[in-house]
């Protein structure tokens, strides 16, 4: 097909800013523009683009390790144009990310930069006072570092009562901070909270019962295979390829109508999140929310307010780090039901 180059001048109102992109469009390929090239965790990426008329596109936000962290889909209009927003996780690390748009064998990857911390301070040791959110904050006495330097693992460092252990992302060193401070550090990408944050405050009996209810990864794969057969799905991969692998991992996710958002990795051995984050403007610094989720799954009286799922993410991949679309299924890790399916 002969390529037709068309100049589309579009004006999209974005908050108080005007997004005036100039998009060079090819008649038979995917073209897109983002509202800017540099973002911060928690921001929304606004995308416009062009492809074939009335076509469905998958759009993935891919982190620097080539793992999809947010996914959605959009259908083009009668002229081939499309517009979509995609959220950057609040826990997004610093680095070069990708917006990957795909449909069938057509794929386009666009790089963006996410800044989650000051790159000039990545190698410094933790001081007693550091800068966050435009002001100095106190992050605790030198005791955590003394424990760390004496040979104690960062995740085993003990904090005094009322303080929370935070692991600095750039060098995996420990700091003991107030809970409200830990939330700010996590939102800014400075650190992550150890799993110990949940084991220390969660209800051990409820957590143990919840963990015992988590189906095995093997069971999740069998559930997906049954789902594929029952729905007569022809997977959009070469099933005879020697490179085909089934990747399985336990996640806590949110499932909006047109995609998914990975929020946490979950440790299947203990049934709690491996890291802490905040999202959708809601604070999840208090580990009690996970206890309420556990109660919900166990059929106990609860005060659950979030609406996510604990799932086994089952992916069919022909490469270790695939940035395009591939068959993806999510199985509720407690009810053993397929709650999300995308065949390429």
Image: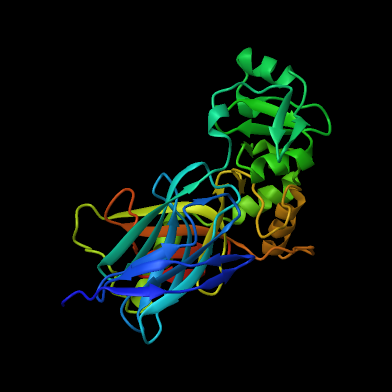
Tell me, yes or no, if residue 344 can be seen here: no
Tell me, yes or no, if residue 129 can be seen here: yes
Residue 230 falls left or right of residue 288: left
Residue 36 falls left or right of residue 52: right
Outermost right residue: 161
**Residue 276 percent coordinates (x, y):** 64, 45
Location of the N terminus (image quadrant): bottom left
Outermost left residue: 1
Location of the C terminus (image quadrant): bottom left
**Residue 68 percent coordinates (x, y):** 44, 55
Rendered position, 226 above or below 195:
below
**Residue 268 percent coordinates (x, y):** 55, 47
**Total marks drawn?**
0
Outermost bottom residue: 78
Residue 52 quadrant: bottom left
Q: Residue at x 34, y 73 (%)?
A: 7
Q: Residue at x 19, y 57 (%)?
A: 241
**Residue 67 vs residue 264, the one in the foreground:** 67
**Residue 12 percent coordinates (x, y):** 53, 72
Q: Residue at x 23, y 63 (%)?
A: 239
Q: Residue at x 49, y 71 (%)?
A: 84
**Residue 163 vs residue 184, the one in the foreground:** 184
């Amino acid at each position: 097909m002969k390529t037709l180059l068309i100049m589309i001048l579009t004006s999209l109102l974005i908050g108080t800013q005007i997004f005036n992109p100039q998009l060079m469009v090819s008649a038979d390929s995917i073209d897109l523009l983002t509202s800017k090239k540099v973002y911060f965790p928690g921001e929304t990426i606004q995308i416009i683009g062009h492809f074939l008329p009335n076509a469905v596109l998958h759009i993935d936000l891919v982190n620097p390790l080539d793992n999809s962290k947010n996914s959605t889909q959009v259908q083009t209009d009668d002229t081939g144009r499309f517009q979509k927003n995609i959220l950057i996780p609040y826990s997004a690390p610093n680095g070069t990310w990708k917006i990957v748009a795909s449909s069938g064998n057509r794929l386009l990857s666009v790089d963006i930069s996410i800044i989650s911390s000051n790159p000039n301070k990545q190698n410094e040791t933790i001081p007693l006072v550091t800068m966050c959110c435009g002001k100095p904050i106190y992050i605790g006495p030198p005791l955590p570092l003394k424990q760390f330097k004496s040979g104690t693992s960062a995740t085993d460092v003990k904090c005094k009562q009322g303080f929370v252990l935070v692991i600095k992302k750039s060098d995996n060193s420990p700091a003991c901070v107030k809970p409200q401070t830990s939330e700010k550090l996590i939102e800014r990408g400075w650190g992550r909270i150890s799993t110990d944050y949940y084991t220390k405050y969660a209800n051990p009996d409820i957590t143990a019962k919840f963990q015992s209810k988590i189906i095995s990864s093997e069971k999740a794969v069998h559930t997906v295979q049954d789902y594929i057969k029952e729905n007569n799905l022809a997977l959009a991969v070469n099933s005879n390829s020697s490179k085909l692998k089934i990747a399985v991992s336990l996640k806590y996710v949110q499932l909006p109508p047109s995609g998914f958002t990975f929020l946490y990795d979950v440790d299947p051995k203990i049934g709690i999140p491996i890291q802490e984050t905040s999202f959708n403007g809601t604070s999840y610094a208090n580990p009690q929310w996970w206890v309420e989720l556990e109660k919900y799954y166990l059929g106990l009286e609860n005060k659950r307010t979030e609406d996510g799922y604990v799932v086994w993410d089952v992916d069919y991949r022909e490469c270790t780090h695939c940035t395009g679309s591939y068959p993806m299924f999510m199985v509720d890790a407690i009810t053993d039901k397929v709650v999300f399916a995308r065949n390429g």
